[in-house]
Image: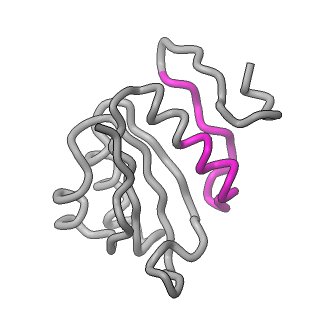
Amino acid sequence: MSSMSKVYPLNKGNVEKHALENRGSYRLGNALNEKGGLDGVSYVGRDDVNVRTRLMDHVNSGKASYFRVFNADSVREAYEQECKDYHEFKPAENTNHPAKPKNHQYPCPVSGCEYCE
């Protein structure tokens, strides 16, 4: 079952515990708000095979302090969540719209986006 995690400090232990070795998307940030959520998302990403491995790439990058992961049931679900996050948060570290998954032509689920067709 697909699920969005809580926000956790970005470190090896938390990534291993909360990100499945499966497809998914994620949000990165550097500060928490008063409710314990990310206060500003600096980057959104996705991996269509193993989101844990992709998050591990960010652990030592120093570009983020916190993460939130969406463990998806399908590649399409992971892509759609990444697109929604990209449009909602407009992260500074993302210069391009999320790429479509390899061998798939799923439209962006956000109405009005040039990639929604």
Q: Position of residue 103 (x, y in %)?
A: 48, 12
Q: Is residue 90 above or below residue 61?
A: above
Please identify the quadrant where the C terminus is shown: top right
Q: Position of residue 89 (x, y in %)?
A: 65, 59
In the image, farthest residue toward the bottom: 34
Task: Please state which of residues 69 and 30 is positioned toward the viewer in this rendering.
Answer: 69
Q: Is residue 110 above or below residue 18?
A: above
Q: Is residue 83 magenta?
A: yes
Q: Residue at x 52, y 41 (%)?
A: 81
Q: Is residue 57 above or below residue 73?
A: below
Q: Position of residue 52 (x, y in %)?
A: 27, 48
Answer left or right for 102 relative to 93.
left
| Image quarter of residue 11 | bottom left
Answer left or right for 18 relative to 55.
left
Please identify the quadrant where the N terminus is shown: top left
Answer left or right for 43 relative to 64.
right
Q: Residue at x 47, y 63 (%)?
A: 28
Q: Is residue 110 magenta?
A: no
The color scheme shown is one colour
Per the rendered image, the range of residues in magenta is: 82-101
Q: Is residue 37 above or below residue 18?
A: below
Q: Residue at x 61, y 58 (%)?
A: 93
User: Main SS type for the magenta part?
Assistant: loop
Q: Position of residue 20 (x, y in %)?
A: 22, 45
Q: How many marks?
A: 0
| Image quarter of residue 98 | top right
Task: Please state which of residues 13 and 38 is positioned toward the viewer in this rendering.
Answer: 38
Q: Residue at x 17, y 59 (%)?
A: 17
